[in-house]
Image (cartoon, coloured by chain):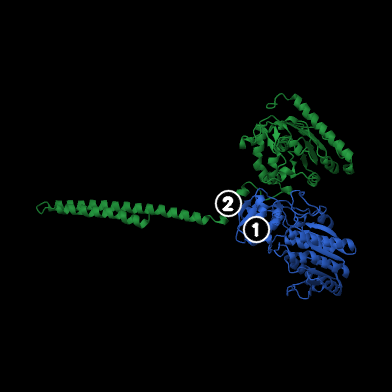
Chain colours: A green, B blue
Amino acid sequence: MRPGAAGTSAGRGPKRMSTRALAAPIARRSPAGGARRERRALIQALESQLTQMRRELEWERRGRIAGEGLEVSLARLVHAGLRGLTLDNLGRLQAALYFAWHSVKTEEFGRDPVFADTLRPFFEFLYGVWWRVEASGIEHIPAEGPALVVANHSGVLPYDGAMVKLAIQHHHPARRDCRMLILDMFALLPFLAPTFMKNGEVRAHPDNAERLLGNGELVGVFPEGVKGVGKYFGERYRLARFGRGGFVRIALRTGAPIVPCAVVGAEEIHPILARADWVGRPLGLPYFPLTPTFPWLGPLGFIPLPTKWSIDFADPIPMDGYGPEAAEDPILVNRLSQEIRETIQTMIDGRLARRRSVWFG
Amino acid sequence: MSRIAITGAASFLGSRLLRRLVETRGPGSVVVVDVTHPPAALHGVGYRLVDLTLPAADRKLMELLREDEVDTVVHTAFFTDPRRDTSYAHELESIGTLNLMGACSAAGVKHVVQRSFTAVYGARGQNPAFLTEDDPPRPKEGFAWIQDKLEAEQHALSYARRYPKMTVTILRLAPLLGPGLFTFYTRLFARRVVSVVMGYDPLLQFLHPEDALPAFDAVLAKRIGGIFNIVPRDTVSLLTTLHLAEKVTVAVPHPLAYALAEAAWGTGLGEAPGGFIDYVRYLFVADGAKAARELGFEARYGSREALMDYLAYRYPDRRPRAWAMAEARR
């Protein structure tokens, strides 16, 4: 309603009423005696009428102001809202949302410390509550200098990498950050690619690994690769081929010691009963797992089973005794690769023999 | 007296390089070989009109180089921006370099410095995080913008092999970004809405123009042949770049992005053809260790600093809070 319209319609009522009220006492006036009393009564009546009129006018005025105020403020708000809905403000809003959980600074290999801190509580929950990870042998990881942590891979999604990383951060006295080398299939998928990169993971490429070790960093690698994460449930805890020994060549070239690591518990988080790889291929996935929950339960299928995990580290295997040229000796590389694989297999078998329950360890 | 000749002196980099050469060597020892006059302010600079795309350009250039006693040539006649007229770009960049190399080798030029681009490595998912000069360049097939630059490099390298007396240096510069630049990268900043590939956020390198010139100084002083990556100190992610500029980003799924970019380029709305999508999806970060080791060149600016310098120049009256954090040098 327009403010003017409200004013005129509301103003008509009291004006008519007041003329009628004014006329009544004058008509009743008698000429005989008590003129002073009558005059006083008339004055009183007039005064009360005037007061009433003044009050009504005041109410009306207030009401009009209140109505106008509301309408004006609403109009202003809508106007401001429309004026505020500009691309500039949208850009500002996007920037504010982005920098709320991203840093303006990017470290080497794209690690974003603020982003990594944002993701951390999620992994901490998985580590402490969901899988109740038990870590042992952390002391085998050198306090400083380059080292290559070599572990078995499983679990459809590379949670084991995140857990090994957290185990070292929790229990190692130097709280070393282990940079995980990740498979192309994860490093190139949309959304996952920048997430991994900003969380500090690096695409598995010999040049990347050598550069990290050359910087004196702790590097984690899963030589089984896709064959490990996409393993059938029936083949659980039987290590697949260790690639082509690339990790041994890198260790030989850089002289970094190898720390074998056995992860138990990750094989059962997403048991692969069958695979429908033809579904995943158009999506750029090397395999498409069918687990008891995925894809039958929709998004619930992504929830991993709450098994009990243990992560064991063994004595580091020194690699600097062979010299960098040993990396070109395929027989030696393959032998070392097999030895490390057997070490990890033995560690897993030992842990499995002691394990009484998948869920409680 | 030995002179230095420069091509592409009207470009952003070429004009700054020309001024630098005139300042350090004196106007008498600099010759501009171009189709455009050098600025009138640079008195005494030699000027030779040579169109490198003409069939007899090599012979004409050879005679001029001999006449002027040129012993060093700086070749910067390349298009930074993708061009719709791809055949002219091919004539200038690929064939023009072939003509130039032929002329230089015949005229007995001792040193040729060619400007190139880190984009020749090609942005690929399989790239290592840092590309070195030993990694083979594998740009996208059919993407003329970068194929021509790679061909120019290959011509230069083949002449370097055939004429060992002529030192050929190729400087692969990371994309330039800084005050005063106007390239297809900076034109993205002129837009209010920038489309990105959904779910990808690659690292980018932006070389500050003030870092590009010392690299040429170093290579001219040391006269070392070969390929060198000239890159900034660090990297910056694409989304950080766009959000620091407070752009509205619209994410396009990658199966659609190539076709949409190609359509936008074809209709004149886009800044670059579909092949460029790879460069905002995957890495093509180059490693500057070889330049540091052999040329003694180390960039003073990082990518983020180059970006902040550019943003301060582009938006002089804007001061978002994120800028203060981004400008703080380590």
- Of A165 and B258, the residue lying toward us: B258
Marker disc for residue A93: 2
Q: Mark 2 falls within which chain?
A: A
Q: Residues within 10 Å of mark 1 (few under 14, many from 20)?
A: some
Q: Position of residue B14 (x, y in %)?
A: 75, 67
The kind of residue on which mark 2 rests is Leu
Q: Is residue A230 left or right of residue A300?
A: right
- Let me know if marks 1 and 2 both belong to one chain: no
Secondary structure beneath dot 1 equals helix
Q: Are marks 1 and 2 in contact (CB under 8 Å)?
A: no
Q: Which residue is mark 1?
A: B263
* Quarter in which the N terminus of chain A is drawn: bottom left
Placement of A228 over or under B255, stated as above or below:
above
Q: Is residue B51 left or right of residue A320?
A: left
SS class, disc 2: helix
Q: Nearer the viewer, residue B294 or B129?
A: B129
Q: Quadrant of residue A143?
A: top right
How far from the left and from the top, in percent, is residue B121?
Answer: 77, 55
Q: Position of residue A214 (x, y in %)?
A: 81, 45
Where in the figure is residue A346, as x and y percent of width and height? 80, 29
Q: Is residue A358 visible?
A: yes
Q: Could you say which quadrant of the image residue A176 lies in?
A: top right
Residue B99, compared with residue A304, is above or below; it is below
Say which of B11 and B97 sits in front: B97
Image position of B212 with respect to A150: above or below? below
**Which residue is pictured at 80% across the width and 66% down the height?**
B95
Identified by mark 1, the residue type is Ala
Q: Nearer the viewer, residue A347 or A104?
A: A347
